[in-house]
Amino acid sequence: MERWWHDAGIAAPRLIGCELVRTLRGRVRRGRIVETEAYLPDDPASHSFRGLTERNRAMFGPPATAYVYRIHQVLCFNVVTGPRGQGEAVLIRAVQPLEGEDLMARARAAATQGSRPPSGFGLTNGPGKLCQALSITPRHDGQALLDPDAAPGLRLEIRPAVAEIRTSPRIGISKGVELPLRFFEAGNPWVSPGRPSAP
């Protein structure tokens, strides 16, 4: 496995441009990662900061494992990095739909119980939104993402690194706010509304 997997701060920008592929009932939904956030072992905003628990167990697994958790009634999807037992991960904050956008819209409409169907950039420009659009569920927690037979219908496909990436402080946290650990593709309209950025 490539060396960048061993540090969330390096893996977070490297994952931009990679693709999440969800296959359900024979139909494919594909999204290109355009925004991430790194969470490190010594990071007070990280779920692993206080050690291993039943909730964050997947975060201490091997790299390229899924870590899925619920917050504010929505799910968030992370890619675990670092050696097994280290407790670090990259939150996937937004994806750009590449395939199955109509399926994503239906899944989001069903998840929001028939409220106005989401459309445009708002379809997948947030961590909860992309989990709804790709039908990511708690059963994906702890699954290997590079092995198509291990994760039920969900895999990560590595793509070439993206050249133009910007950084900013992370969003929606109260600790470690000042750390520039949010990464996103410059100029991509599918990035979530966020903070001022730097090259």
Image (tube, rainbow, N blue to C red):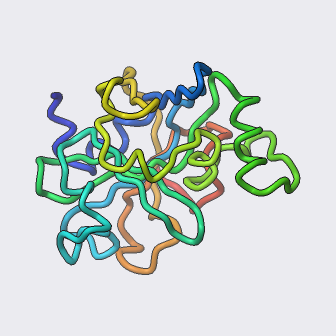
Q: Is residue 194 left or right of residue 147?
A: right
Question: What residue is drawn where x is 17% and y is 44%?
Answer: 62
Numbered circles on residues, count: 0
The residue under the point 17% across, 48% down is 82
Place of residue 63 in the rendered image (x, y in percent of width and height, measured from the top left): 21, 42
Q: Nearer the viewer, residue 127 or 143?
A: 143
Q: Quadrant of residue 39?
A: bottom left
Is 141 in front, or is 46? Answer: 141
Report x, y in % for residue 190. 65, 41
Q: Which residue is at 31% across, 41% downward?
A: 143
At horizontal 64% and vertical 51% (from top left) the residue drawn is 129
Q: Is residue 134 above or below residue 45?
A: above
Q: Is residue 130 left or right of residue 147?
A: right
In the image, 17: left or right of 30?
A: left
The answer to whether 43 is drawn above or below residue 190 in the figure is below
Q: Residue furthest front?
A: 25
Quadrant for the N terminus in the image: top left
- Along the horizontal axis of the image, is 155 left or right of 31? left
Residue 135: x, y in percent? 58, 42
Q: What is the x, y in percent for residue 46? A: 31, 68
- Asked which quadrant contains residue 96, the reply is top right
* Relative vertical location of residue 67 with respect to residue 31 in this rendering, above or below: below
